[in-house]
Amino acid sequence: MSDNEEQAEQRPGSGNKIKPMMDHDDKKDNQQDEPSGGIGCCGYILWALSVLMIVCTFPFSLCLCIKVVQEYERAVIFRLGRLLSGGAKGPGLFFIIPCMDSYTKVDLRTVSFDVPPQEVLTRDSVTVAVDAVVYYRVKNATMSITNVEDANRSTRLLAATTLRNVLGTKNLSEILSDRENISHLMQSNLDECTEPWGIHVERVEIKDVRLPVQLQRAMAAEAEASREARAKVIAAEGEQKASKSLKEAADIMIQSPAALQLRYLQTLNTISAEKNSTIIFPLPIDMLSVFMKK
């Protein structure tokens, strides 16, 4: 086939030869850019009758022809089942033909929902129940209506599936300590999947991770044993340091006999300050040395 014939087949007026070869995005763009005049003979007749009825019932027909959408809403209009050019309408006033047009309002505000608790088997074969919160908004009202039947329900189901798939590749320790990275990974996966639906996932947060009761007891026992082991090591290190200090003090007292007497008096002072009802009779150490020699 020559180049001229190929160009002739690709011209807009050359028939419907290239329509089977068009992908989904091209069809969507053509639907959005197609003028409202291509509605056929019956469509023109119905359009003329509708306009005549509107004129005859004016101004009462304005109640059915003029619609209002809020600042956070958009209206996707279909005329005889075909999407009007220009995309979604709003905010503010817009005009429809009652007998021909149908429209759907789309809320553009951020929506949040709870992902139901999912029973997940982690990579290290531990069963946990995890729930999350997802925040998303509609960034393209036309795509959210034409490309998916129910964008809200589809996003909820996809979020639950993505939560199970992502957590299934993580260990229990990673799930408990690395929630932020798991949330970012879920957000990127969800945003990539919902982009053809006109949905933008803004944030994903892991709410709670619930472990089985037996596993909680085992982890608690392990943590308690670990704490006891650390306490014993610390106490042993303290005894070792104290014994070294006592040895050094004993060596000093041997060199100066008066130091032992001063230490004895200091001990008596401490006892008398703590227990005032106790009567203490100091006994010189020299007398004890006499008995020890005998």
Image (cartoon, helix red, strand yellow):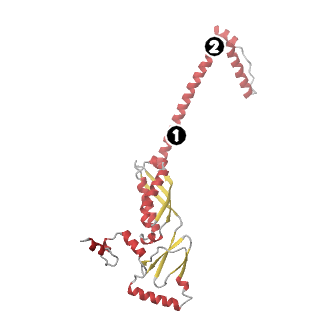
Q: Is residue 286 visible?
A: yes
Give the answer, above or below, for where 269 lies relative to 147: above
At label 2, the amino acid type is Ile
Q: Residue at x 40, y 71 (%)?
A: 29
Residue 133 visible: no
- Give x and y (percent) for residue 153: 45, 67
Closer to us: 37 or 282: 37
Q: Nearer the viewer, mark 2 or mark 1?
A: 2
Mark 2 neighbour density, 10 Å: few (under 14) some (14–19) many (20 or more): few
Disc with the residue nearer the chain's start (2 vs 1): 1
Q: Relative to 51, does residue 241 appear above or below in the rendering? A: above
User: Rounded to the nearest whole Å, what is the CA distance between mark 2 and mark 1?
Assistant: 45 Å
Q: Amino acid at mark 1?
A: Glu
- Is the residue 209 above or below the residue 96 in the image? above
The residue beneath circle 2 is 254
Q: Nearer the viewer, residue 28 or 33?
A: 33
Measuring 46% from the left and 65% from the top, which residue is drawn there? 199
The front one of 5 and 258 is 5
Question: Picture coordinates of residue 243 (x, y %)?
Answer: 58, 22
Which image quadrant: the C terminus? top right
- Which quadrant of the view contains residue 288? top right
Q: Quadrant of the N terminus?
A: bottom left
Circle 1 sits on which residue? Answer: 224
Residue 7 percent coordinates (x, y): 30, 73
Where is residue 196, by image quadrant? Answer: bottom left
Q: Which mark is residue 126?
A: none
Mark 2 secondary-structure assignment? helix
Task: Determine the residue positioned at 49% across, 66% down.
Answer: 139
- Give neighbour class at mark 1: few <14, some 14-19, many 20+ (Cα, 10 Å): few
Q: Residue at x 42, y 87 (%)?
A: 44
Q: Is residue 255 above or below residue 154?
A: above
